[in-house]
Image (tube, helix red, strand yellow):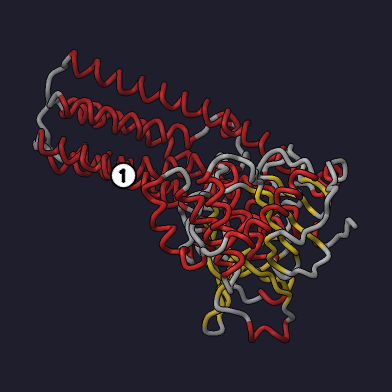
Amino acid sequence: MTRKSFTAVTNYLDDHKIHIDQDEFELQLEGHPDFPSLLAFSDALNFFNIENYSFRIDNDEKDILPEDFLALIEGELAVVNNKEHTITVNGSPSEDFFSKWENIILIIDNYEEQPRTKSKLKNGSVNWGIAALLFLFLFAYDSSHLTLKLIFVATGLIGFIFAYEAYKKTHGKGTFIPVGVCRSDYLNTDCDLVFNSKKWKIFNKVDLSEISLLFFTSQLVCFILLSLIKNIEFFFEIYRYGLFAFIPIASLSLFYQIFVVKKYCPVCMVIIASVCIQLVAANLIFFTDKKMDGNAAALFFIGCFGSLMALVNFRTKNRIAQKNENTLKRNLKFRRNYQFFKNNLSLQKRLINEDFSSAFVFGNENADQTLTFVTNPFCKHCKEFYPVFLKLVKKYSDELRINIFFDVDLSRDDLDNRTVHINLTNIYINSENKIEFLEALNGWYEVQGYSENKNGWYQKYSKYFGSSEHALELLRGHEKWVSSNSVHFTPNIFMNDSEYPIQYERADLEFFIPEFLSENYN
């Protein structure tokens, strides 16, 4: 599976109104040891808390297919819509779907959106809001030639957006453009083929997406600068004739698409249409000419040169980021390789005391495999790892015995510390549903160190507080277990009797549990 599968999955998520950070999704995907397998895509979706399932379905069972799903077709994932007995693949009708597919589908169930994705979308909305306010201010500041200004700003912004999307496509990044538009047999479109094809030597050295991005960036910057000195006529005078230089570039692009690649690129068409509209408007709509103004010429030069420097800097940073990302992907793939992890795990410290009778136990008490988590209610690093731990408890409670020990020192002269440990232990002892203890610990991590927020926590769980005798008995067992196994830091994790390697991130644990469950270290 290649980028076609990546594009299909991201478009499938978009169709379901599931918005994720595509760069991070790609990072998790390509960092997977089994990339580009179906398992890699499934695990990458799990990373974003997107529950997904794969099924093998025979052709005689096709009546049970859902309305939309991802299917393996000739080694690639594709978005399939199955409505009113009509099959479309990636937006195009397909009459031979059942002769090409590999009888494997991937569907999503439910989704818990990551906060960072919301933040990224919010920041993007704020940026566009600021840009809109800026141009509204400029129109109010100088209302002359308003029609021409509106045309240039609208087409300039559209051209900039699509030039940036073209740049991302050229450099292998995700885009908001639906796959059914950018790649369709019915429309004879294929953006990736047009951008990445090197059938002409000129395109090996010239990046038209960068030229387009520079053109529209400099245009918008110069528009703003010349509007501020109320000499927008100078701007239009230059573009009245300067835009004619774009005609051979547009003609070259169209010829390349029609006769060389024989596919169309909707992104390129939008860019060409934007410039053509500007060219027609600048030559047909009347505006007052102004004589050469030294200040205007200087600002125009500054705008163009500044845009060029910004693009060069952007390209340099993008190349460095791409290099770092590729290095990180290689490191992730190495680090998440289970065989390497298993070899490393076998070299770690072993438990001396395997008496788990005093532990807080969750999951399957009779399971062959155990996962032991050593924590401290006042540990900030434990707070960071705890969401991953809760996810593992929820997902593998039928297959794992999960133990929790507190790293507690009962001889310590700290009443608050002692009280918190006793209260949490009483919640575990007295609650009928032990999941309440996990929720209480999660709640405590949220308020730890913030005394003004603790009252609500105490009120919520005070019904479980009682005699400290039984709680102290359990905590002494925790203290003895931690001391006899020489646990000196938290969070600490043991997989069966082996300590989780300190070289690995705690959050990486979830990548190893499936294969860990399939083996027996005893």
Q: In the depicted view, which residue is nearer to us: 438 or 288? A: 438
In the image, 99: left or right of 412? Answer: right
Local crowd at mark 1 within 10 Å, few (<14), some, or many (≥20)?
few
Residue drawn at (63%, 65%), measured in percent from left and top? 394
Q: Quadrant of residue 297?
A: top left
Q: Can residue 89 be seen in this snapshot?
A: no
Residue 161 position, x and y percent, is 38, 43
Q: Quadrant of residue 350?
A: top right
Residue 46 position, x and y percent, is 62, 59
Residue 61 position, x and y percent, is 70, 85
Q: Amino acid at mark 1?
A: Val
Residue drawn at (37%, 25%), measured in percent from left and top? 307
**Which element carries disc 1, helix, strand or loop?**
helix
Q: Can residue 476 be seen in this snapshot?
A: yes
Q: Quadrant of the N terminus?
A: bottom right
Residue 180 position, x and y percent, is 51, 62
In the image, 32: left or right of 94? Answer: right
Q: In the depicted view, which residue is nearer to us: 97 or 133? A: 133
Q: Is residue 356 shown above or below 218?
A: below
Q: In the depicted view, which residue is nearer to us: 329 or 148? A: 329
Q: Name the residue at the right extreme.
A: 522
In the image, 8: left or right of 126? Answer: right
Residue drawn at (33%, 23%), measured in percent from left and top? 304
Residue drawn at (53%, 49%), measured in percent from left and top? 22
Q: Quadrant of the C terminus?
A: bottom right
The residue under label 1 is 126
